Amino acid sequence: MNPTLAGFLIFIVNVMGITIATPGNLSPASPWPGWAFAGSMNTVNPLLANVPYLAPVGSWTVYQWAVYNLAGDILINYAPNQAPDTFFSDQRASLNLTNFQPGVVTAAADQGTSSTLIDPEVMKGLTISQLANLGTQWGRNYLGVAQSVGTNWGLT
């Protein structure tokens, strides 16, 4: 099955926990879900639709999961608040999305402690956009799907 805007709206409510109502986190008339969905559809490799669908009937395919997660990441990063609600700016602040992060920390130390994270080879090939996707759980889910099905899908 191909991803749909209606499916993404279900994802927004049931997976992301965003209220689509007036008042609420997102107005039913907001164009942002459609824009986030379109941006995701233009980014996610449509060949993911060819990945075999071995899940129960009614669950999302790999392609749908990738599109909905990337669209969720886009929505969190760009959607404005619906006054007086501050959901989106609060999310961006809590996830530290407004600060530039040019890469992934591989080592940190002070006078008493030190730690180093393994820097997987894939991290070295991420684009600026993909590094930004690491800021939200939905962006990380998208990158995980794209990476897990092989190098033909945009990640190496």
Image (tube, rainbow, N blue to C red):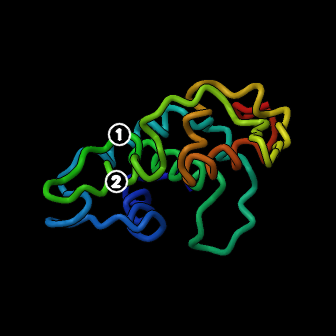
Pick the front one: 102 or 37: 102
Q: Report whether 97 appears left or right of 141.
A: left
Which residue, given by chain and number where applicable, does mark 1 sit on? 78
Which image quarter is the C terminus in?
top right
At 63% from the left and 48% from the top, the residue drawn is 140
Gap between marks 1 and 2 measured at Cα: 12 Å
Q: Please report whichever mark, 1 or 2, sits nearer to the chain's N-terminal start.
A: 1
Is the residue marked by circle 2 packed among few (<14), some (14-19), or many (20+) residues within 10 Å?
few
Residue found 45% across the figure and 63% down from its top: 16
Of the pair 120 and 112, the residue shown nearer to us: 112
Give the residue displayed 14% in from the left and 58% down from the top: 84
Q: Position of residue 88 (x, y in %)?
A: 32, 51
As drawn, is 148 to the left or to the right of 93?
Answer: right
Location of mark 2 (residue): 90
What is the x, y in percent for residue 124? 77, 26
Q: Is residue 7 or residue 90 the one in the foreground?
A: 90
